[in-house]
Amino acid sequence: MAESERPAGASEEAAPPLQQSFMIPKKEINMVSDMGKWKRSQAYADYMGFILTLNEGVRGKKLTCEYKVSEPIEKLVALLNTLDRWIDETPPVDQPSRFGNKAFRTWYGKLDQEAEKLVATVIPKHLADAAPEVAVYLKESVGNSTRIDYGTGHEAAFAAFLCCLCKIGVLRVDDQMAIVFKVFNRYLEVMRKLQKTYRMEPAGSQGVWGLDDFQFLPFIWGSSQLIDHPNLEPRHFVDEKVVNENHKDFMFLECILFITEMKTGPFAEHSNQLWNISAVPSWSKVNQGLIRMYKAECLEKFPVIQHFKFGSLLPIQPVTS
């Protein structure tokens, strides 16, 4: 797990500078034959470890439960609030095509310019050298400005951004619940607003055969939240009344609500994979199945991973046992 690898004391404000040279992350997976390099890499092990640690951290917990909110968590929420405000300041433009509103490029241009400054507000001064490396993952996490699309690769970049903040000691083990419930949940709200406002295209969507047009991680962590729930079973998430009454407590149901807002027609037709999942008997089985599916459909797919960037915090070098 990412947290265990940082030197003791690295997370103290007054800690000496980390003996680490940071670098601007770059693409390393250029051909399908490079995928083995990715799966053997320290980056893959740390990324997956981070996802699974958070999966355990939110198990059986509601979004509305009490948890510790540290200063870096508050600063990350403020950063996301800034991105949200910029959407309000950058209304969609009139254009002939319904999808991919070009105003997204203006919004993205602002992030591209300000990302390092935004990241610098979250990390302590003695770690200032890490800002350019970490900021790359933030810029990659909001969609593609050329294609005006968004998909699970962008979502993975945001998880990588948070993982990097753990590795440099800004976020800590006891921030786990707040990382998912406060920061990642706020990120999802901002992404949904981007998707709606600028009518973003799904990146590499598998259409009706994909889990969801845009996200994957909230289904994993959201199913973990529901493990051992006394009344809600997987079959209930296709029931509109159940979703309306419980979505504020559970990320999974929040995702279902957004899908039903954005899509018309029978659920079984527009979200066939999710419909099938509703027949699985228990949430722990759903959770395990989604983790397997995430590896197969996202992390082991060249079209997604070719865009992933590697640096000093998420290195392409093989895992050292």
Image: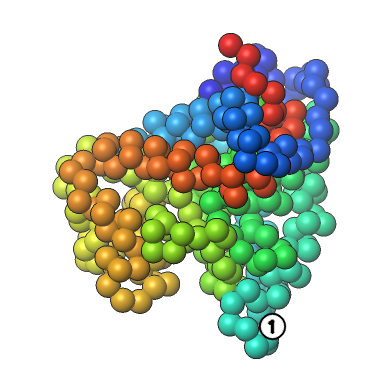
Q: Residue at x 33, y 36 (%)?
A: 288
Residue 161 placed where, x, y %?
Answer: 64, 41
Q: Residue at x 40, y 42 (%)?
A: 293
Where, by quadrant of the figure, is residue 109 drawn? bottom right
**Left or right: 242 with respect to 273?**
left
Q: Work out which quarter of the rendered image holds the C terminus and state it.
A: top right
Check the image and report above or below for 175 versus 200: above
**Left or right: 282 with respect to 191?**
left
The residue indicated by pointer 1 is 93
Number of numbered markers: 1
Quick one: which residue is furthest to the top in this view? Answer: 321
Where, by quadrant of the figure, is residue 294 drawn? top left
Residue 230 placed where, x, y %?
Answer: 17, 42
**Left or right: 184 with respect to 55?**
right
> Please, what is the three-letter code of the amino acid marked with disc 1?
Val
Q: Residue at x 72, y 65 (%)?
A: 146
